[in-house]
């Protein structure tokens, strides 16, 4: 089946066209600065010359029209007709506590996406805008929403409840949700495949480490715990986000330092993490280079990052039923920073992790980087969220066709 995968932001749309048989990407692209005077359209077809154009893209509908036109263009296109598109898979960030899998887009599902906009105000409204724009232009094609939170929806109460009065959960839904679920789902399945294991009898801690960071304990194909929570700040320090902070510090910032809630939000989300600790950058590549050049604060940022990651990996591993089969690194830092992997794994020998220094030189691409005698396999796996969205979309559409 040919699936069009859409990731819609407030002023951008990422897209891929994927042939699920053989997991083949037919084309990919990006529309940026939608609604601005000068937008950008990037199109990259497999086996053909791509293009980049600067032009005004009035709105999401115009952007989708432009995209559909180019993929069937006689010279640059990869399809003869848009009728070849079997379904559209839409990335949606937040599905709340009620969405536990990908869902065919219906009025009820749209209502859930709208209700969860308060939990993901920068993402859900834009995701829904993309769904409606594409559906208007492809009304006869099934549309499926694939939620980042869905993979974590079945984590048990001991994982999702905070130590707050239970009424705050009952009345206001204050609980852990978790994010990056599509990425964790993909790399955990791929890790099992690479190790020739049945994913239904396989455990791992998946480490999605980019500008945003989340870790997940995956047991027999299901997430059972994760480091991110109600929002996207807790856990390991990130590019600009603080990670775990004692709430007493936040109260001190407000009550004693006189900072407003907006001031505190700005600090925690945009001025902390690698950027705040190092004083150099939110980009791990810049921080690592500065540390290697002798910058003490950059080196400190690296060690704080690795310390927090180790602590969360070890904690998550305790929820895997007594067995950790693999530790998986993915996303920008996880895939490309051999120094971060080295620092994180140093100290995890207690779990049976033995990193191989020669294998760990990998910078991108799939690899097993643990020693041959390591009890726990350590893998680097580039994430492929678009492929996972396409496969989940196909599963939902074919399930609907089969009926109950």
Image (tube, rainbow, N blue to C red):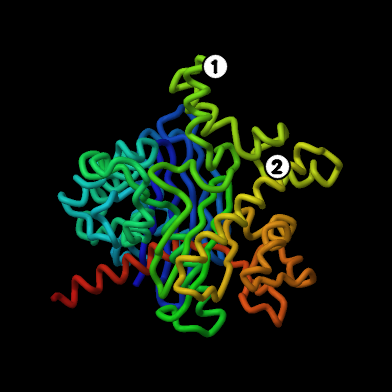
Quadrant (top left/top right/bottom left/bottom right) for the N terminus: bottom left
Horizontal and vertical percent position of residue 234: 49, 43
Query: Residue at point 40% right, 64% down?
Result: 223
**Residue placed furthest toward the right:** 294
- Label 2 – label 1 distance at C-alpha: 24 Å
The answer to whether any part of residue 194 appears in the image is yes
Report helix, strand or loop for mark 2. Answer: helix
Q: Work out whether residue 289 or residue 257 is closer to the camera in this orientation and state it.
A: 257
What number of labels is visible?
2
**Residue placed furthest toward the left:** 404
Say if mark 2 contacts mark 1, CB within 8 Å.
no
Query: Residue at point 45% right, 56% down?
Result: 226
Above or below 224: residue 296: above
Horizontal and vertical percent position of residue 155: 35, 61
Horizontal and vertical percent position of residue 79: 40, 65
Q: Work out whether residue 343 or residue 290 is closer to the camera in this orientation and state it.
A: 343
Q: Is residue 279 left or right of residue 308?
A: right
Report helix, strand or loop for mark 1. Answer: loop
Q: Is residue 232 left or right of residue 350?
A: left
User: Which residue is label 1 attached to?
Assistant: 257
User: Which residue is label 2 attached to?
Assistant: 301
Above or below 102: residue 20: below
Q: Which disc is residue 142 wearing?
A: none
Query: Residue at point 22% right, 55% down?
Result: 105
Q: Work out whether residue 348 or residue 219 is closer to the camera in this orientation and state it.
A: 348
Q: Is residue 85 left or right of residue 49?
A: left
Disc 2 versus disc 1: nearer the observer: 1
Q: Quadrant of residue 121?
A: top left
**Residue placed furthest toward the top:** 258
Q: Residues within 10 Å of mark 1 (few under 14, many from 20)?
A: few
Query: Residue at point 38% right, 54% down?
Result: 148
């Amino acid at each position: 089946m040919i699936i069009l995968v859409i990731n819609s932001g407030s002023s951008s749309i990422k897209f891929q066209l994927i042939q699920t048989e053989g997991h083949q990407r037919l084309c990919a692209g990006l529309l940026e600065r939608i609604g601005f005077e000068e937008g950008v359209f990037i199109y990259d077809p497999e086996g053909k010359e791509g293009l980049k154009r600067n032009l005004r893209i009035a709105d999401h509908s115009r952007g989708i029209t432009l995209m559909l036109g180019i993929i069937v263009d006689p010279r640059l296109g990869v399809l003869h007709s848009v009728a070849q598109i079997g379904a559209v898979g839409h990335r949606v960030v937040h599905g709340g506590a009620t969405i536990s899998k990908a869902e065919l887009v219906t009025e009820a599902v749209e209502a859930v996406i709208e209700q969860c906009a308060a939990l993901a105000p920068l993402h859900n409204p834009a995701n829904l805008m993309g769904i409606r724009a594409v559906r208007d232009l492809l009304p006869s094609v099934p549309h499926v929403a694939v939620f980042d939170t869905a993979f974590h929806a079945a984590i048990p109460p001991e994982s999702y409840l905070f130590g707050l009065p239970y009424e705050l959960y009952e009345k206001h839904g204050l609980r852990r949700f978790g994010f990056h679920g599509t990425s964790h789902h993909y790399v955990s399945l791929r890790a099992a495949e690479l190790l020739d294991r049945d994913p239904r009898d396989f455990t791992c801690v998946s480490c999605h480490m980019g500008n945003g960071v989340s870790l997940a304990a995956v047991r027999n194909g299901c997430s059972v715990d994760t480091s991110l929570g109600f929002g996207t700040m807790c856990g390991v320090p990130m590019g600009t986000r603080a990670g775990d902070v004692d709430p007493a510090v936040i109260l001190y910032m407000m009550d004693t330092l006189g900072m407003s809630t907006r001031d505190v939000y700005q600090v925690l989300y945009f001025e902390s993490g690698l950027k705040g600790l190092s004083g150099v950058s939110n980009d791990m590549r810049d921080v690592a280079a500065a540390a290697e050049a002798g910058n003490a604060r950059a080196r400190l940022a690296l060690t704080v990052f690795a310390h927090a990651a180790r602590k969360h990996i070890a904690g998550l591993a305790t929820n895997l039923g007594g067995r950790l089969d693999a530790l998986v690194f993915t996303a920008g830092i996880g895939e490309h920073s051999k120094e971060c992997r080295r620092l994180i794994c140093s100290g995890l020998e207690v779990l049976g992790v033995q990193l191989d220094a020669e294998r760990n030189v990998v910078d991108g691409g799939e690899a097993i980087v643990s020693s041959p005698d390591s009890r726990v396999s350590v893998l680097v796996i580039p994430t492929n969220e678009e492929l996972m969205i396409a496969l989940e979309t196909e599963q939902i559409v074919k399930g609907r066709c089969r009926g109950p």
